[in-house]
Image (cartoon, helix red, strand yellow):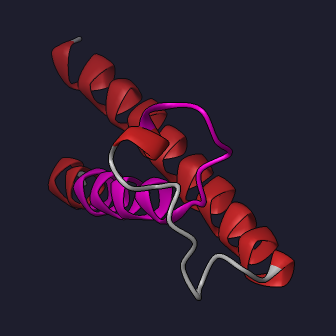
Amino acid sequence: MIIATSAVLILSSLLMIVLVLMHKGKGGGLSDMFGGGISSSLGGSSVVERNLDRLTVGVGVIWFASIIVLALLFKGDAG
């Protein structure tokens, strides 16, 4: 069970990194410094951005839940 939960945590972490990097920069920050100010064809639609937000929140919930489950599994394993 620990190995499966760890795999879910690793996959959700990698997916979270990719999803956060796909977000359109809101301007003025580090995203503009590294080329985030260039408009892309994917970031133009508000529907795409809204769906990306929903997907990021969903993956974040899975990521957070897997951390909690791992903590409970390790706590029960140590006792």
| Residue 30 place in picture, x, y as percent | 43, 33
Left or right placement of residue 49 versus residue 65 in this view: right
Q: How many numbered tags mark residues here?
A: 0
Left or right placement of residue 60 versus residue 34 in this view: right
Q: Residue furthest top?
A: 79
**Camera-side residue: 34 or 68?**
34
Q: Residue furthest bottom?
A: 41
Left or right placement of residue 43 versus residue 5 in this view: right
The residue that appears at 25% across and 54% down in the rendered structure is: 1
Task: Specify the quadrant of the image occupied by residue 71.
Answer: top left
The stretch drawn in magenta includes residue 10: yes
Q: Which residues are magenta?
A: 8-30
22 in relation to 29, above or below: below
Task: Specify the quadrant of the image occupied by residue 58.
Answer: bottom right
**Camera-side residue: 74 or 57?**
57
Quadrant assignment for the C terminus: top left
| Residue 19 place in picture, x, y as percent | 47, 63
Q: Main secondary structure of the magenta part?
A: helix
**Camera-side residue: 64 or 45?**
45
| Residue 44 place in picture, x, y as percent | 72, 80
The stretch drawn in magenta includes residue 47: no
**Camera-side residue: 10 or 51?**
51
The residue that appears at 84% across and 82% down in the rendered structure is: 47
74 in relation to 27, above or below: above
| Residue 51 place in picture, x, y as percent | 75, 76
11 in relation to 42, above or below: above
The residue that appears at 40% across and 27% down in the rendered structure is: 72
